[in-house]
Amino acid sequence: MRLLPATFRHLLSYLMPLTRRVPSAHTGWLEITTWRGHKTLNTATANYSYGLLQQVLRYGLRFVPVTNTAAPVLVLGLGGGSVLPLLRHEQGRTGPVTAIELDPAVLQVAATEFGVEPGPNLHLVCADAFAWLPGAASNTYELVVVDLFLDLTLPPELGEAAFWQQLRRVLQPGGRALCNLLVTAELWPDGQPLPEFLEGLGFAVKDMEVEQLNRLLILQRLA
């Protein structure tokens, strides 16, 4: 009997978009919308998973070669988990993924609506990424995906040197980071434009504008 409502909603979504709202202490509301059988996770103003965001991350990952499919990956800002199929199915990564998500409501939606559950190769942590990162082991991750948004706002910590220093520390030598930012955000750690600061920190930097709003930085730790 439990299957019938879900099947009915799935079929009905081909006639009209269906939206369910979930309260969030961080964004007010989360919206799970099913349209033509496809679910997306949004806030009132931004796509969080399985929509435009997934397309942006898919594009960015095209510039991130996979040197070791079994290497550990860190995701800062999980959302509904739409980056996971990109890593697993499109890039063929089989190694452990650690995902940090600030909002417990988002983690609950990821589990109930998108089937994202912890397992042997997926470690989910409900925490502030900026507080969690200094405690992570050095030289650990071959890839870090940074997608730290609250609605359409970037946390101010992304404009501080400490975050980028910690990001470099947890990456393996030669490891890469894919960072999803905003074109309109002014980030000046230590008073320098972000790309110049990162180059001085020991990164190779590729800076791209995507979909008019998103800015992708693809970083490689040089040593």
Image (cartoon, rainbow, N blue to C red):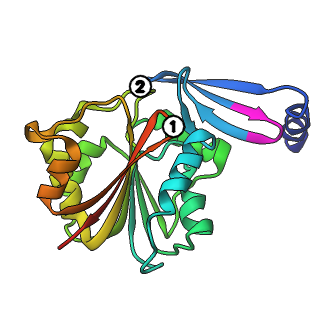
Which quadrant is the C terminus positioned in?
bottom left
Determine the image quadrant of residue 112.
Answer: top right
Q: Residue at x 55, y 42 (%)?
A: 53
Q: CA distance from mark 2 to mark 1?
A: 10 Å
- Label 2: element kind: loop
The overriding secondary structure of the stretch rendered in magenta is strand
- 132 up-or-down from 202: above or below: above
Which quadrant is the N terminus positioned in?
top right
Give the residues in magenta.
Answer: 33-38
Q: Which residue is mark 1?
A: 106
Answer with left or right where residue 54 lies relative to residue 1. left
Q: Residue at x 85, y 39 (%)?
A: 10
- 103 up-or-down from 78: above or below: above
Q: Which residue is mark 2?
A: 26
- 146 up-or-down from 88: above or below: above
* Label annotation for residue 128: none
Answer with left or right where residue 99 lies relative to residue 5. left
For mark 1, does the 10 Å Cα neighbourhood hold few (<14), some (14 to 19), or many (20 or more) residues? many
Residue 134 visible? The answer is no
Residue 70 visible? The answer is yes
Residue 159 coordinates in the image, percent (x, y): 20, 37
Residue 99 coordinates in the image, percent (x, y): 42, 54
**Disc nearer the start of the sequence (2/1):** 2
Determine the image quadrant of residue 84.
Answer: bottom right
Residue 115 coordinates in the image, percent (x, y): 64, 51
